[in-house]
Image: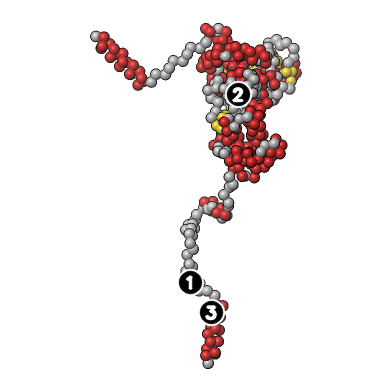
């Protein structure tokens, strides 16, 4: 009997296990379960289902693209990959600069652009810089065959003669742009490569270099490729210092001009006359010397003054006043200025500032007066009160 009872009990248990669970029983709560979203919640507000499963991004130096770059430099240029990796571990990424790169550029007419660079302050400072380094400027200009006023002027346009050269670590900004700015990644990786080669050649710590948000360095604001290719060691001390060594700075700018076709004594610009509408495609291709002045006649473009020979020229229209466009023929030296910065506004500003500085250098009566210090109202009241007190004491 006991055996029968035991068999019956086992059969009952098996039947209970095979039956469906009680659907009315409340489910047990799970640990750390997030509260349910309201029924009408926006789907877009929900995080991706697999977000929690995504692994954290690797440290910058260990990213696959960075390590591929390290391997490339080690293979092609003999860098120590361990040293490079350690340097990339010291990078402080600057994602804020990427917004500056993507900010739409707004083209201003020349009459608005010009006052920022051709003004009494820059003319006076340019003459002062010339006086401070007169012998050096003359020596560099003579050796390289570049007019001194253009050496002085372009440094004023670029950095106000070293007053604004940038405070970013070049390694940081170039690394950020090289690996986190896909649109121009190839360009910035090339510049980063040139920069590391430059630092190695100079025997310098790459983290010592400071520059602009784009990686341009020193008083002349050379990108690393230009620094590497065109910077000069004027005094022969074994370093090309375009930050603090005025001789190296001037020689580097002069060398850059000559490398891009500067010809001493040749004009920069000639006034032009245009007819019809055929000239407009020339304005869209204003940075390349394709045509000689005689060939521009087919486009309705002629020089307004007599020209020796038949030089190559580009058409440069500039809005000199609201609704007023002046037309110029940019010759080889103008082209060299646009190699420094591909902007006709920039090249014209360098040219006009150079002429103004030279005029004031030769004739001090043309030197703009020193700006008067700005006196705030509170300071004016104090000055008046001081005058009154002096009068009372005298009485």
* Image point (60%, 32%), residue name: 206
- The residue furthest left is 395
* Image point (65%, 36%), residue name: 189
Circle 1 is placed at which residue position? Answer: 24
Circle 3 is placed at which residue position? Answer: 16
Q: Quadrant of residue 344?
A: top right
Residue 261 against residue 40 in the figure, above or below: above
Query: Is 96 in front, or is 230?
Result: 230
For marks 3 and 1, give the one nearer the viewer. 3
Mark 2 and 3 residues: CB-CB less than 8 Å, in contact? no
Circle 2 is placed at which residue position? Answer: 241
Residue 228 in the image: x percent, y percent?
66, 27
Residue 302 in the image: x percent, y percent?
70, 15
Mark 1 and 2 residues: CB-CB less than 8 Å, in contact? no
* Image point (61%, 44%), residue name: 62
Residue 129 in the image: x percent, y percent?
55, 15
């Amino acid at each position: 009997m006991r055996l029968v009872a035991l068999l019956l009990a086992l059969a009952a248990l098996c039947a209970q296990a095979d039956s469906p669970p009680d659907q009315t029983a409340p489910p047990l709560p799970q640990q750390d379960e997030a509260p349910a979203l309201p029924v009408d919640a926006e789907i877009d507000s929900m995080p991706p289902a697999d977000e929690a499963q995504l692994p954290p991004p690797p440290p910058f130096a260990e990213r696959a693209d960075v390590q591929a770059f390290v391997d490339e430099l080690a293979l092609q240029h003999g860098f120590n990959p361990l040293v490079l990796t350690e340097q990339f571990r010291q990078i402080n990424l600057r994602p804020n600069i990427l917004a500056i790169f993507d900010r739409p550029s707004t083209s201003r007419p020349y009459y608005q652009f010009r006052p920022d660079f051709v003004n009494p302050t820059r003319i006076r400072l340019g003459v002062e810089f010339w006086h401070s380094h007169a012998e050096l400027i003359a020596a560099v200009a003579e050796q390289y065959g570049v007019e001194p006023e253009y050496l002085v002027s372009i440094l004023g346009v670029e950095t106000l003669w070293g007053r604004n050269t940038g405070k970013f670590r070049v390694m940081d900004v170039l690394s950020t742009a090289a690996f986190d700015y896909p649109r121009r990644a190839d360009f910035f990786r090339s510049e980063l490569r040139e920069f590391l080669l430059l630092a190695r050649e100079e025997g310098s710590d790459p983290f010592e270099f400071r520059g602009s948000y784009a990686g341009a360095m020193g008083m002349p604001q050379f990108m690393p490729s230009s620094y590497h290719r065109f910077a000069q060691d004027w005094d022969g001390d074994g370093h090309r210092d375009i930050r603090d060594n005025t001789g190296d700075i001037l020689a580097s700018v002069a060398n850059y001009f000559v490398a891009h076709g500067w010809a001493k004594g040749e004009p920069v610009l000639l006034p032009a006359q245009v007819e019809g509408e055929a000239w407009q495609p020339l304005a869209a291709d204003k940075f390349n010397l394709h045509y000689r002045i005689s060939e521009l006649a087919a486009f309705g473009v002629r020089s307004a003054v007599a020209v020796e020979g038949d030089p190559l020229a580009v058409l440069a229209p500039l809005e000199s006043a609201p609704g007023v466009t002046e037309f110029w023929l940019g010759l080889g030296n103008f082209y060299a200025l646009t190699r420094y910065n591909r902007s006709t506004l920039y090249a014209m500003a360098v040219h006009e500032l150079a002429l103004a500085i030279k005029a004031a250098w030769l004739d001090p009566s043309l030197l703009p007066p020193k700006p008067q210090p700005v006196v705030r109202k509170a300071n004016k009241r104090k000055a008046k009160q001081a005058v009154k007190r002096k009068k009372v004491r005298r009485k």
